[in-house]
Amino acid sequence: RHFDGKQSHEELCEGPPILFGDFLRFGVPSELKLYEEVPDLSRLPRLFEEYQDEYNLSQAVPLNLVFFRDHCEHLCRVLRILRQPRGNALLVGVGGSGKQSLTRLAAAIHEYDCFQIEVTKHYNLAAFRADLLTLYEAAGVQGRPLVFLFSDTQVVDETLLEDINGMLNTGEVPNLHSPEDKQKAINACLEAAHAAAPAAASMSRDAVYAFFIDRVRDNLHIVLSMSPVGDRFRGWCRQFPSLVNCCTIDWFDRWPQEALLSVAERLLQNTDLQVTGDLRREASQSSASLNLSHQEPAAEDGLQPPSRSRSRGADRESLISSPVPSLPGGRSALTPDPSLGYSTGLQASQSQRKSVSGGQAPSLPAAQGPESDVELRHSLCVMCVEIHSTVRQASEQFYAELRRHFHVTPTSYLEFLSLFRAVLGHKRRETGDAIQRIRNGKAKMKETNTQVDVMQGQLTAMQPLLQEAAARTEAMMVNLKGRQQTALEIKEQVAKATSEAAEQQQVAAGLQQEAKRDLDEAMPALEKALKSLDSLNKTDINEMASYLTPPTAVLKTITAVLTILREPKNDWDTAKSVLRDTRFIQRLKDYDKDNIPSATIQKLQGYINDPSCTPDKIATGGSLACKSLCLWVRAMDLYYRVAKVVAPKREALASAQARLDETNAKLRTAQEQLQEVEDNLAALQEAYEESLREKHELEAKIAVSSKRLVAAASLTGSLAQEVVRWDAQLLQMEA
């Protein structure tokens, strides 16, 4: 009743597409969504942008898609496929068409989980089947709707496609479940199977497993993303027919010019052009001459999409690789810049999106004399579309003439825009560096002129300083010579006094050696006597004092001791009194041997010359204590005789030492005078050297300043005209 046969082919087949979907009510729970016709196609881009924003809030890798008309249609198809039970899709298109990005967004709109394998170096069939077991458990046991996204770049082994072929056809993968895994799945689904078929009294294991497989097929939606480039895809379609028979095929054609323009505007919207007025006029003239109407070439060979888009099969072969320039950072010029923030094919920024009208794709207007950055940016985008279209036409002509494919894909278009941004930034940096170099050159010229004036003033001020330094240095030289002569005279006096002191020191040392030699003769006997006194004790002394009539040896020894001690009487009673004195031994030790009177020594000679008063005979006739006292008496006598000989020598030594001290005092005085003169001379020498150094520095500065003045005058004279050219070039660059 809707077709009366009067409609034309254009009205029936070439009008606005008729789209249905259950996604028109944003934010409504899935159970309340209605599958209805899209009344206004212009609403779709903004609606999908809202879904995309919601997706980006929950994902680590955000999407940045440009929703032009073809993408909206493809997204509607994928959404319709995924909402159907056992709905599977085969998305066919060249790289960069947006197949995977649209699938992820469609899964998020339906609130499905999207799963995709991660191919690594060691990924194999066992790892793939482990991932499948995870999917089967989530879809069959837990009953969660899932989207399994699989692309042709993940086919590490064709056995993977064989397993996917079985999943699409029967839902089962041969030998996927071991008996234990199968039993585990049956036990997990037994309650759900009984709930699904309450009329059945009992269910066999096979029936429960069949329920598990049906549940997997209902909840697991397989989306295959394939590229028609090369022979692999058509070979897979022949080997694994379920890829075609059990999937809804959606063919992604080449982007229309409307899409190319939208993507270019999105990617270049934040690019600061910073162009001059001359470039604006050139861009105006170029954009005004663009003709953006192009015929789309017919397909060459291979699998064809549906008849409506059959003429769009020219980009089904692999892109011919060719050397490309490298950009800073080692990135290829045809590699998309990660900083742009779009995913493979279609991702771009999220502002200034074009609405899609419901009819023919709008033609791209040529800009007429852009005067603002917005119009200039639009003209630049139009130019990018024209370049891409021209290259695409050239590739078709290349195939027609040489039968060799060179495909121009959406990826190459995005790489072209990325290359433009990279080259623009590189050239902008080069221009900025050139401007900075010119500014630095001008600043250096100005600084040079300032330094020339400063050096001229310094040179004028240094002339009187140089003359003053020369006069001061000459006066210091005269004073230094006089001081040096005085120091020389004092040095001679000090040398003479030093010689005299050395001679006197030698004489005094000789006298001291003779006296010491004579004393060394008596000292052993004295030390032996003192040591023997140490052996006496109070008992020995009391024993001698207890004699009523002492032996002759004891009496003679004690008499000699009393004589040396200069006691008034030499009788035995006096002797006993002295012996009983507690300090008797200490008196002997502390006796002043250096001041023994000669009369005492004369009285003592009778004892010394007595043959019976030797230490050994005294020890025999008396006691050991008497022997010690005898040794002490004889030591005193010996010391007196030695000291009598040494005394004149000591006097001579004292006289020589006095003369030496006087000479040393004169020497010290002369040395102090010499040190003072040398210190003054050193200070004067240092001042002279400092003055001489200042004079030389002034002379060197004057010489350097003179050379710099000559060089600066030559430089400024040579670059006088160059500065004018720099100014003109700087104005041109900064315009």
Image (spheres, rainbow, N blue to C red):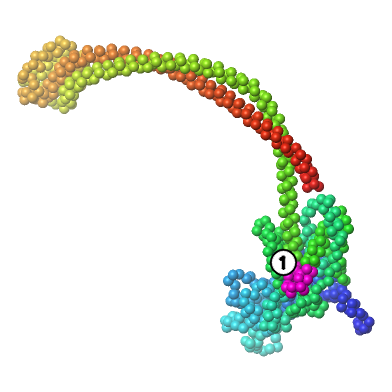
How packed mark 1 is, by other alpha carbons closer than 10 Å (few <14, some 14-19, many 20 or more), is many
Q: Is residue 542 left or right of residue 318?
A: left
Decide: is 60 above or below 442: below
Residue 168 visible? The answer is no
At horizontal 6% and vertical 23% (from top left) the residue drawn is 617
Q: Amino acid at mark 1?
A: Thr
At horizontal 67% and vertical 56% (from top left) the residue drawn is 328
Q: Among all residues in the image, which is located at the extreme top? A: 599
> Does residue 702 belong to the magenta stretch?
no
Q: Principal SS element in the magenta part?
A: helix
At horizontal 22% and vertical 18% (from top left) the residue drawn is 515
Q: Quadrant of residue 284?
A: bottom right
Decide: is 538 above or below 152: above
Decide which of 688, 542 is in the foreground and name it. Answer: 688
Q: Is residue 498 left or right of residue 399?
A: left
Q: Please state the horizontal and vertical placement of residue 395, each as a whole percent of the image.
A: 76, 69
Q: Which residues are magenta?
A: 393-412
Q: Is residue 509 left or right of residue 411?
A: left
Decide: is 701 above or below 330: above
At horizontal 83% and vertical 64% (from top left) the residue drawn is 354
Residue on which disc 1 sits? 344
Of helix, strand and loop, which one carries label 1?
loop
Q: Quadrant of residue 577?
A: top left
Decide which of 31, 314 is in the foreground and name it. Answer: 314
Q: Quadrant of residue 124?
A: bottom right
Q: Please state the horizontal and vertical placement of residue 503, each as a whole percent of the image.
A: 30, 16
Q: Among all residues in the image, which is located at the extreme bottom? A: 201
Q: Please state the horizontal and vertical placement of residue 171, each as a whole percent of the image.
A: 67, 82
Decide: is 709 above or below 140: above
